[in-house]
Image: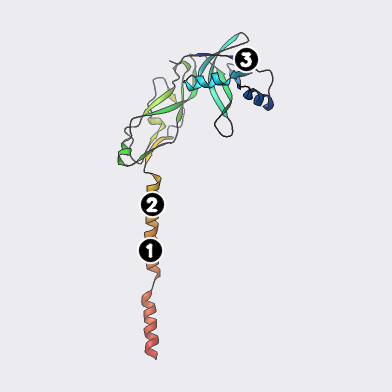
Amino acid sequence: MSETVALKASVREESGTKNSVALRQQGKLPAVVYGHKKDSVAIVLDTHEFLDSLHRGNRIFDVDLAGAKDTLLVKDLQYDYLGDTVIHADLMRVDMNERVKVEVMIKLVGTAAGTHMGGIIEEIMNHVEVECAVCDIPEFLLVDIKGLELDKTLRAEEIELPEGFVLVTNPNAGVIGCHEPKAIVAEEDEDAEGVEGEEVADEGAEPEVITEKKEEEGSSK
């Protein structure tokens, strides 16, 4: 069962890009709270405290704003253009017993059968979207790949979900694949092209015709 973590926050009085940049320089993170048919509220979080909680696997927070206590679910994070730094957070008001759609990270378990035949694992997706009760949101989903053979792909519908969970991600979406290293495939393609080129060269050469012509020229003298 997911647990809530107390998080300090304050209402953000000013908005705009310039103000957001100034806040981030002070170690603060701009965020917005919305949901439950209430007005959206712009808030400010302590960046270190918030990100440290996320890294510990926490996604549900209790926040006290102006005397009103809300339970908030991290719904979205926005990153800078390099994709390294969180610059904004979207937090949705929730009730612990309500059902929500949420993205859950995938954690692989076991060694794929295809790797024993020279295959490598390709993680096509590192998360899937599911619908479940807020109190049941897991830190990650365990995905057993021991039965994954060479040149096969594990699809979203094949992931075993906990009871009460509903898959939202396209069931046919590929999640984990096992295939031969691309370098080997590329070498095989090059070898095939070389053989085809030799065949074309052999077909285009006609030494017999040239010989016949020389013999005709010699006999006329």
Give the residue at mark 1: 198
Q: Determine which of the numbered discs, if any, sits on residue 10 in the image.
A: 3
Across and down, in percent, residue 12 comes to: 66, 18
Q: Residue at x 37, y 41 (%)?
A: 179
Q: Earlier in the sequence, mark 1 or mark 3?
A: 3
The amino acid sitting under disc 3 is Ser
Q: Which one is earlier in the sequence, the residue at label 2 or at label 3?
A: 3
User: What kind of residue is marked 1?
Assistant: Glu
> For this view, does 197 lie left or right of residue 38?
left
- Callout 2, which amino acid? Glu
How many discs mark residues in the rendered view? 3
Residue plotted at (55% across, 25% down) = 76
Element under disc 2: helix
Cα separation between marks 1 and 2: 17 Å
Looking at the rendered structure, the secondary structure element under dot 3 is strand
For residue 156, above or below residue 73: below
As measured in the structure, the alpha-carbon distance from the residue carrying label 2 to the one carrying label 3 is: 59 Å
Q: Quadrant of the N terminus?
A: top left
* Callout 2 crowding tier (Cα within 10 Å): few <14, some 14–19, many ≥20: few
Q: Residue furthest bottom?
A: 221
Q: Earlier in the sequence, mark 1 or mark 2?
A: 2
Quadrant in which residue 207 is drawn: bottom left
Image position, residue 69 (x, y; %): 57, 10
The residue that appears at 51% across and 17% down in the rendered structure is 60
**Residue at mark 2:** 187
For residue 152, side relative to residue 53 (left or right): left
Foreground tag (1 vs 3): 3
Tell me: residue 140, above or below residue 94: below
- Which quarter of the figure has residue 77? top right
Q: Are marks 2 and 3 in contact (CB under 8 Å)?
A: no
